[in-house]
Image (spheres, helix red, strand yellow):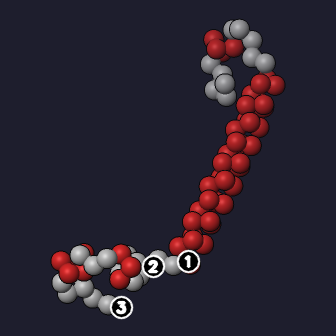
Amino acid sequence: MATVTNWIDHLNKPAEEVVGAVYPGAGSSEGILVILAIILWVGWTVLTAKSESDELERLGRKRHGPNDHKSNITDW
């Protein structure tokens, strides 16, 4: 790994002379991690949406009456 000893000369170079990324870890593994993160995000969203719709459907089937709040029902 190269070390920059003179930042002024390094920053004044044309873009085609600068080789490599400025930060470590750049490369093909970075793309794989982004794809993995997107897959996890979409999976989490689908599982959460299904779980919430199942819970709302279960609560909707109970059909609480207009005076049920007076009985202090905890699973409202």
Q: Quadrant of residue 70?
A: top right
* CA distance for labels 1 and 2: 8 Å
Provide the secondary structure element on which disc 3 rests: loop
Three-letter amino acid code at the position of disc 1: Ser
- Which residue is drawn at the image coordinates 24% and 85% (left, top)? 4
The residue beneath circle 1 is: 29
Residue 40 x/y as whole percent: 64, 59
Provide the secondary structure element on which disc 1 rests: helix
Where's the C terminus, which quadrant?
top right
- Which residue is drawn at the image coordinates 45% and 79% (left, top)? 25
Provide the secondary structure element on which disc 2 rests: loop
Classed neighbour count for the residue bearing mark 1: other residues with Cα under 10 Å, few (<14), some (14–19), many (≥20): few
- Which residue is drawn at the image coordinates 39% and 83% (left, top)? 19
Classed neighbour count for the residue bearing mark 2: other residues with Cα under 10 Å, few (<14), some (14–19), many (≥20): few
Residue 57 x/y as whole percent: 78, 31
Q: Residue 25 bears which disc, if any? A: 2
* CA distance for labels 3 and 1: 18 Å
Task: Decide: is 61 above or below 2.
Answer: above
Residue 17 x/y as whole percent: 35, 83
The residue beneath circle 3 is: 1
Task: Decide: is 59 above or below 66.
Answer: below
Left or right, 59 with respect to 12, comes to: right
Q: Choose the circle earlier in sequence order: 2 or 3.
A: 3
Left or right, 49 with respect to 13, comes to: right
Where's the N terminus, which quadrant?
bottom left
Q: Choose the circle earlier in sequence order: 3 or 1.
A: 3
Badge 1 vs badge 2, beta-carbon distance below 8 Å? yes
- Which residue is drawn at the image coordinates 74% and 43% (left, top)? 50
* CA distance for labels 2 and 3: 12 Å
Three-letter amino acid code at the position of disc 3: Met
